[in-house]
Amino acid sequence: MLFENEKIEFDEKSIGIMNIADNEINEKYILGEVRIVTEQARYPLNTITMMIDSKNYELNPDFQRRRRWDDVKKSKLIESFIMNVPIPPVFLYENEFSHYEVMDGLQRLSTIYDFYNDSFKLVGLQLWPELNGRYYSNLPEKIRKGVDRRYISSIILLQESAKSKEEAQGMKQLVFERINSGGVKLEGQETRNALYNGKMNQMCLQLSRNKYLCAMLDIPHEELELQISFIYDINSLLLQNERYKKMEDVEYVLRFFAMRQIDGYANRTLSEFLDMYLKKTNFYDDSTLNSLRALFEETIEFAFDLFGSSAFYMWRKRSTNYSDESWNWFSRATTTIYDPLMHVLSKMIYSKDILLKNKEIIRNEVKNFYQENYDAFEGRSSNKNDIEKRIVLFENFFKSYLE
């Protein structure tokens, strides 16, 4: 059952090409609508650390992706500077006078910053293999000075490009989409985070750090890594986690909310469904968002208490040399289980005490449940009908413990 004001309309009327006279088009151009004011700058590499430390450059604005480069990719960027290979410019947005958000170039700027702070050593270099294992501080003097005299260019979108915060957000998202259309492919949630940022997106980002979700997705969390964090910084652990880097955790949160209105999935791809859901729910009022937040937090804890960190693992059949029907757990959370299980548990919150009393029996019986309904779970397809079928199966499974 949906909360008050939660229901959204998914059908959008298509907007056809407007029949506008040439003189009106010319007038629009003269008035400067959708025109971006820019300037260019060049920064010596050895000034990047000082720039970032000055707090005048914001590396992680809301529309940026998470840092994804490993040390090999970072090293290749530094090797390119050594060889004076042209590097694409970074894009900055002046959100206040002399204060900038990094729209595109997070990986490059953070790599330069880390390099000058000896945060990683060069590895995997092919044209300069003799520098592998070196930090900036112990590079040969000529190499170090050569890097210091290199520059990285920037294109700055000036504050006067937008007349309001809303217009600025739309412009930044538009530019981000255009400059990332031909580069490294963004994952679905990375694109959504850039193009459809708003209150719902911010809530999904916050809830992605829920300790129970992190435990079930095998993503490092401050409360779950107490011993390790004495040795490794939690951010270093996160940057080694593929699910975190690709924002899969954020998409998991979004999927939970979207599946509450699964009818909107009809006649759309999953990506289109999630895109449209996020765009529309960014305008939810605070009361609706708070109700959804509480529901997610209670449901994810319920799932953890009931099944532990393997709640979203699937019991699957694998062919082996010894048997044609060897069953084992797929030791990784899958949306095939997550979507229907979370949906059903959220509807059974008021019966959780009864189900938790039977959790040992349920944990044992769930293997038989997956085997008996394997045809419904084995495929990777997750269209609307597939998910609804799995929802019904889970509902019947849990109801048997409530009778």
Image: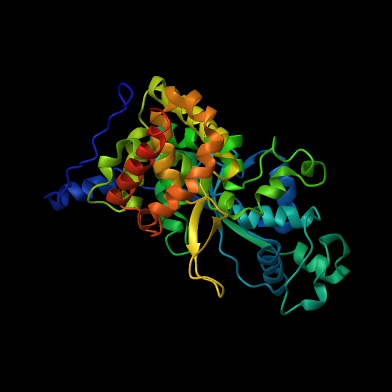
Residue 32, position as x, y percentages in the image: 32, 45
Name above or below for residue 352 compared with residue 92: above
Residue 164 visible from this viewpoint: no
Residue 333, position as x, y percentages in the image: 53, 50
Q: Quadrant of the C terminus?
A: top left
Which residue is drawn at the image coordinates 73% and 41% (left, top)?
225
Left or right, 233 with reference to 175: right
Instruction: Judge by depth and name the residue closer to the eye, 156 or 354.
Output: 354
Which residue is drawn at the image coordinates 79% and 41% (left, top)?
227
Q: How many marks?
A: 0
Residue 79, position as x, y percentages in the image: 71, 71
Name above or below for residue 316 compared with residue 190: below
Name above or below for residue 320 compared with residue 89: below
Left or right, 30 with reference to 303: left
Residue 286 visible from this viewpoint: yes
Residue 365, position as x, y percentages in the image: 49, 44
Q: How is the image coloured?
A: rainbow
Which residue is drawn at the image coordinates 31% and 43% (left, top)?
276
Q: Quadrant of the N terminus?
A: top left
Left or right, 166 with reference to 117: left
Which residue is drawn at the image coordinates 59% and 38% (left, top)?
99
Which quadrant holds residue 126? bottom right
Instruction: Judge by depth and name the residue closer to the eye, 59 or 223.
Output: 223
Instruction: Judge by depth and name the residue closer to the eye, 118 or 251.
Output: 251
Instruction: Judge by depth and name the residue closer to the eye, 30 or 323.
Output: 323
